[in-house]
Amino acid sequence: MTEVVAINHLQKRFGKFEALKDITLTVNSGEVFGFIGPNGAGKSTTIRTLLGILKASGGSATIFGQDVWTDAVAIHKRLAYVPGDVYLWPNLTGGEVIDLFLKMNGERHSAHTDELIKLFELDATKKCRTYSKGNRQKVALIAAFSSDAALYVFDEPTSGLDPLMEEVFQTQVLALKRAGKSVLLSSHILSEVERMCDRIGIIREGRIIETGTLDAMRQLSRSTVRVTTTAPLADIAKRPDVHQFKAEGDHTATFAVDSENLGAVITTLTGLGIVTLQSTPPTLEDLFLRYYNQGGEHDGQ
Amino acid sequence: MANKFKSVGLVLALNLRRDWLKIVFWLLGLGGLMTAAAAKFDGLYSTQKAMSSIAETLSTPAMVSMFGPFTPKPPYTVAVIYGAMMMVFMGLFAAMMNVYFAVHATRVEEDAGRTEFILAHAVGRQSPLAAAILELAAINLVAGVLEALGLQAANMTGGSAAGNWLFGLGLAAFGFMFGCFSLLLAQVASSGRSATILSYVLLGGLYVVRMGTDVQNPDLSWWTVFGWIEKLNLYTKNTWWPLLLMLGLSAVLLVAAVALSTARDTGAGLIQPRPGRARASRFLAGPLTLLARLERTSTLIWLVSLFILGASYGSIFGTVGDLVKTNPAIGQLMGTGALHAAGRTMVLTFANKLSIIFAVVATIPAVITLLKLNGDERGGYLELVHAKPVSRLRLYISFLVHAVLVGSAALVLGILGMAVAGSASLTATPISIARYLRAFVGYWPAMLVTLGVVMVVIAVLPRLQAWVWAIPIYGVLSLYLGNMIGLPEWATKITPYGWVNLVPASAIDWGAFAWMTALGLALMVAGYVGYKRRDLLTN
């Protein structure tokens, strides 16, 4: 598998403010990479640095093996981008903007473009001044999906879309994935990331704090267990691999277990006589919240 | 009814909080200019002889077209000369200030989406407009008082408190009236940008019409509205009632603006945007053609305006150069041949002054284009373009090429307008169009140098880019008024427009052409070096 995007210890300072402290991640060919993090964590700054809009203060970043700053034009020939805030020239129509963006890539308005305009239900004859945020995003999405790129970069592309359009977006991304394209998707909609992304990178305060597949991250995290036993549960709470123990009487409790020790805990519970047992793997949201709430602790590891 | 204007005070406070620095700059600029010029005048025109001489100059059609009619009768005083020379000029500046604040307080705020946010609170539907009206009234009142106090302090010979206060408050009423025009146009236009364009078309149109009526028959200037500032008879009769006329028209305009504003939606003008093309034209394919398409309407307006401005000035060349008719006694003395030659020189000298104005005015649309490079970047419009295989060099050059083309076209059209109308009106001593076009070759490199400086500022000091307007503004001030307010020679050489010889009266200085062009290009290259290295501006 070849690396399409390779970011190595990337840093970016704005004056004294360190927006990116240490970003290291790779996007492999043919994969959808989910980029998640809270507002202000540095997602857009990372993406803008990848696009050569901002100049890195340290570290390196390449796309297709080329430097993102010096070879920006060559890279952009094979890249499609949709920003989080789409600003379009107020006195052009959506249709004009789509065609202009395609032409700038040396491409043409195709049957696929018309199909996308229909799918996203865009009125392309309206002036951009009259579009809502969602409609402006549709214009950028149609231009991006309709161009034949090797890497697609989406920066929170669905923040203004309604659920139906979000569905269209996901279908299109999955189609790209089937076609063997690479996708870098920054998003707040964790269900979207969970559904589409092969690997995920989590960023917090300018650092990548975790990358990997969702499964691997779940391994590193904790499952939630709700159990009722015949014998009292009090001793379980003292185990070092059990957290957030909440008793509901002596025999029923809800707690979190480090995923790698789940087996050992269940063995102990079996000894106590299990009446009911529910074990839920952590959702991405759990992971996300855990990384943020306990970020400081995690950084120390 | 009261609900419509709820919380107007809060909105006004917010506006003032937003604008205070700009207000301070405008007020200091206008008040300072008035006071400094007035303080200087006593020294410049200390004798009756000096005053008679300047009065004679100001009575020539060329000067009347620029400064308004010279109506005072001798014996002159310094204050009388000052009033006659400054009123039209200061009125123009006061009107420009009001266009700016009127459009910014209304449509620019709406375009930015801030008005929507404000109206979502317990704020009346008409409060933003009412706050804009109050803000304009306050700015003008303070400006008028400052100007009057400045004149009091300058204490010109022949000046009077009545004249000083009439001048200051007259400018305030005059400026406010144009602010009200802008508020009205802001209800009609589809965006802040078009509201500004419409306002300037109106202001420029009235100014040009006034120029014509002043030269032909100043009584007709009553109909131009702009001419009302001339009817104050400063420091002579001190006529106050045109002030009432200005305030009366302002009231009518405001009633209309409020009425129209109830009929429109926030963020939209009365002119509804029509649906456009579903597909881009073949022409729209890259950054340069994108700029040309975006700026199409305003470019057209600039080019036509420059031609009309040139033609309006050119059309009075017949009157300017006809010394035989204006001075029959001298004609008999010198012979008509010599008089024709003198008239010709006079026209060419006037054409030189006008060419400076055309050059500075033609620079404005070019600078607007260049400032868009950062403006659109900051506004997020260029983010998607930067993600395309469009290099920074190509983008930089696209903006430059568009700016230079529009500036050059505007300059050549201004001069051509002057040449064509001048040739038509100047039948006794014809001057060839090629001779007029010397002015284009002369002033074009000065424009190039200005654009080069602008590019360096845009690339290296993007935060300070608004300051580049100082170059054209200073250019006009130093070269238009320089002689009359006794600016030293070196001070007129600070601006590139001051480096040019007296084309079309003198021959083209090809040496200057070459080195100024080279300097302009070098500055543009230097700008690119800075632009290439820095972060693009993001919001």
Image: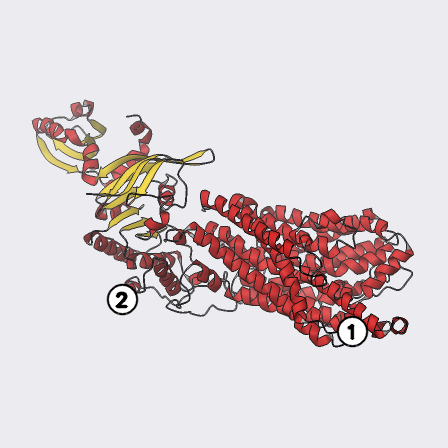
Instruction: Please indicate whether residue A124 sits to the left or right of residue B508 in the image.
Output: left
Q: Nearer the viewer, residue A259 or A77?
A: A77
How far apart in space, not on screen, are marks 2 and 1 (Cα)? 66 Å
Q: Kindly identify which residue carries mark 2.
A: A111
**Going 67% across and 60% down the picture, which residue do you hit?**
B508
Instruction: Please indicate whether residue B19 sits to the left or right of residue B429 in the image.
Output: left
Chain letter for mark 1, please. Answer: B
**Going 61% across and 62% down the picture, which residue do you hit?**
B183
**x, y percentage for residue A180?**
20, 51
- What type is the residue that disc 2 sits on? Ala
Q: Report if residue A126 is visible in the image.
A: yes
Task: Name the quadrant of the C terminus of chain A.
Answer: top left
Task: Name the quadrant of the N terminus of chain A.
Answer: top left
The relative height of residue A151 versus residue B292 in the rendered view (above or below) is: above
**x, y percentage for residue A132?**
40, 59
Say few, some or many: other residues with alpha carbon within 10 Å of mark 1 (under 14 / 14 to 19 / 20 or more): few
Q: Kindly identify which residue carries mark 1.
A: B217
**x, y percentage for residue B171?**
74, 58
What is the secondary structure assignment of the residue under circle 2? helix
